Image (spheres, helix red, strand yellow):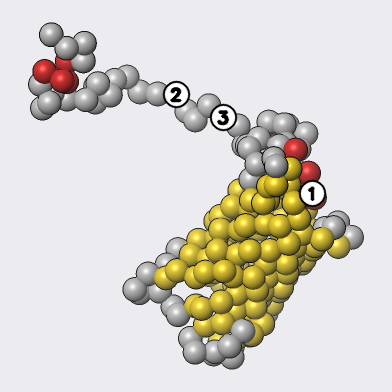
Amino acid sequence: MSANPSDDNPLAPPPWLNAPPVDPYPYEESNDLRVGPKLHPTLDGLLPYIGVWRGRGRGGYPTVEDFDFAQEIRISHDGRPFLFYESRAWILDEQSRPVRPAGREVGWWRPVLDGGRATDELEVLLTNPTGVMELYLGRRKGTQVELVTDAVVRTSTAKEVTAGHRLFGIVEGALLYAQDMAAVGQGLNPHLSARLIRVGG
């Protein structure tokens, strides 16, 4: 007789089917360097970005009227050699009141390693709910990060986005960025820029 009952009866339910519930996810993630797991040494160069950032910006495009927006960005780690990035934005009216939700995206910032040590090069993966996935390659210089798309993947119903360029920087303690985009038949044009201040971490 086999030591594994499912070998005798391939139609038997898998052992996990009736197993008891599991506890919540046991590994901590933190956007505050004072608590949580120890920062992986390969992320030392990106340390200034870790935290919760909130602020406002201006957007537009040749095919879109200019608009004001607010934004919150969370950048966290779980002790492994990458950062988790999450961004939520919302449109503001002329009195800075929320109008509606705007762009969202999640992804990971990964330093390129050489012999186990971080280089100044980065790989950044970003996905948004409108069906666009972007792979950026970039470089860190001090507290500045510049990213350029290496590939853009879209679902069949997504807006046509073909390229992007992003510039991030920590300036006088604030997170500033500018984003250019090539989309809907237009070349690379300014799309978003914002200044966010640290509110957590």
Compute the Cα span from label 3 to label 2.
11 Å
Seen as rendered, the residue at the extreme top is 1
- The answer to whether residue 95 is visible is no
Compute the Cα span from label 1 to label 3.
23 Å
Judge depth for marks 2 and 1 and give the one in front.
1
Residue visible at 62% across and 57% down in the picture: 123
24 left or right of 66 in image: left
Sequence-wise, the earlier of marks 2 and 1 is: 2
Return the residue at label 2: 23
Q: Nearer the viewer, residue 56 or 14?
A: 14
- For the residues labelled 1 and 3, say whether their Cβ atoms are less than 8 Å apart: no
**Few, some or many C-alpha atoms within 10 Å of disc 2 (few <14, some 14-19, many ≥20)?**
few
1 left or right of 166 in image: left
The image shows residue 77 at horizontal and vertical percentages of 65, 41
Q: Which mark is residue 27?
A: 3
- For the residues labelled 2 and 1, say whether their Cβ atoms are less than 8 Å apart: no
Residue visible at 75% across and 38% down in the picture: 41
Q: Secondary structure at mark 2?
A: loop
Seen as rendered, the residue at the extreme front is 115
- The answer to whether residue 143 is visible is yes
Residue visible at 67% across and 82% down in the picture: 190
Residue type pointed to by label 1:
Gly
Residue 147: quadrant of the picture:
bottom right
**Vertical arrangement, residue 88 with respect to residue 92, above or below:** above
Residue 201: quadrant of the picture:
top right
Compute the Cα span from label 2 to label 1.
34 Å
Q: Nearer the viewer, residue 152 or 20?
A: 152
The image shows residue 155 at horizontal and vertical percentages of 37, 69
Return the residue at label 1: 45
The image shows residue 143 at horizontal and vertical percentages of 82, 58
**Few, some or many C-alpha atoms within 10 Å of disc 3 (few <14, some 14-19, many ≥20)?**
few
